[in-house]
Image (cartoon, helix red, strand yellow):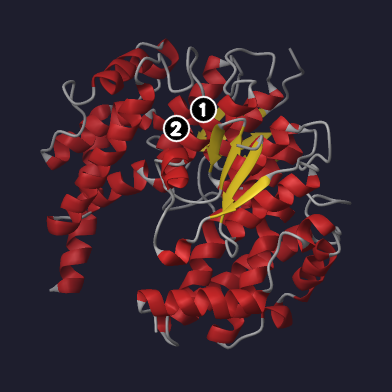
Amino acid sequence: MADQGEVKLLKTWSSLFGLRVVWALKLKGIPYESVDEDLTNKSDLLLQYNPVHTKVPVLIHNGKSICESLVILEYIDETWSQNPPRLLPRDPIQRASARFWAKFMDEKQALPSMWQAFTKEGREQEEGVASIAENLKLLEAELEGKKFLGGEEIGIPDFALGWLVNLVPVFEEILGLKIVDEERHPSLSEWSRRISDIPVIEESWPPRDKLVTKWAAIRDHFLATARASSG
Amino acid sequence: MAEVVLLDFWGSPFGMRARIALAEKGVKYEYKEEHLLTGKKTPLLLETNPVHKKIPVLIHNGKPISESLVIVQYIEDAWSDTAPLLPADPYGRSQARFWADFVDKKIYDQGKKIWANKAGEVQEAGKKELMESLKLLEGELGEKPFFGGETIGYVDVALVPFYTWFYSFETIGNFSIEAECPKLIEWVKRCLERESVSKSLVDPEKVYVDLILVLKKMYGYE
């Protein structure tokens, strides 16, 4: 095992993106110090180590910072390449596929459409919900016959989608909508159970009641702002 | 089908990234134009990128790869023994990925605020944001000849194609990028000295007349 040096992770208690890094560090058995940020009062550490975006998560390894969760995951995989599991496969085509699906989660569809459904109401919300349904169909098709999005082993795209398992039930409760169900999404549902069964992942979920409180307040805030500006 | 095929559109900065990377690695490929301005997408595009239906798509031995930065990283992985675009050490690689991701998050959308709008609040916001982003990138370049160091690398490939759209931003937005970011423009000129870049980038004035003005008309951004 390489000399592991000092590893620090800046995140928040509820950050989905921070959670990905927690899973990677824990699964690979890398000891680290965790610092929970208050984003309404950003620490000097955060401002110093992520001056460009001032966002979490930030990984600080031997005093050098790495930002953006997917960039951090690849860094962890390459730096601690001797520690299983491999987060990205060796084969170039499979690596491309893994990166494609990870990007799909964050930038292209999954999260943005979820955000729209969650922070809007009426017509705009319907569009968000329809968009989510489309995306879930694509994910369902991609997962068919596979244990993980990465194939036989868990990998970066699974980490990228992991928030679905913990956060979607919270959103469903707040919105009063069913987003993922066994009938339309058998493979996704199976995958969710498989992810939840991994001890490191199961023990890292933020507390559900706290999440419900936090996200309900976020939704209220967005709706109130929208109504105030349109009224 | 040829061993390596690139589905592309002549004016796309994203497509140009793939062209530069393939040229750096000396890979022979068949270029197939998608005539995006006709509004029609070919069956090949729909089949090889069913999720996003967008170019560029690289097809290698029949297997498709989409998303320009995923394509560039694939080219790096698949032709790993020549002209590396990423450094060997994980930290250097993480920094290159971070800045390429930064380019992806900012430049296109900020530029669009400029070209797709009339003079006004949105356009002004776009100009301000774009200049902030380019200044940050200029700072990251520092005294190095290229983002990749002595030779071009991943971030250079990610950013330099957007140069072909600068003329359009400047003409429509009535400002000068070179005036505020002279070092960045010097960097562009250094990149253009490389054949992989000069042969992959298109004429900025052609982008303005044959693409941006056409798009503005097509979508009613006037």
- For the residue pair A122 and A130, the one nearer the viewer reads as A130
Q: Which residue is mark 2?
A: A160
The percent position of residue A139, horizontal first and vertical second, equals 34, 30
The percent position of residue B29, horizontal first and vertical second, equals 70, 44
Determine the chain carrying the residue at label 2. Answer: A
Q: Is residue B151 above or below residue B168?
A: above
- For the residue pair B187 and A96, the one nearer the viewer reads as A96
- Image quarter of the N terminus of chain A: top right
Check disc 2 and give the amino acid type. Ala
Q: Quadrant of residue A25?
A: top right
Picture residue at 39% right of the left edge, 63% below the top: B39
Q: Is residue B165 above or below residue B81?
A: below
Give left or right: position of A207 versus B151: left
Determine the chain carrying the residue at label 1. Answer: A
In whole angstroms, how far apart are the C-alphas of marks 1 and 2? 6 Å
Q: Is residue A99 above or below residue A113?
A: above
Q: Which residue is mark 1?
A: A156
| Residue with the most extreme front position | B1
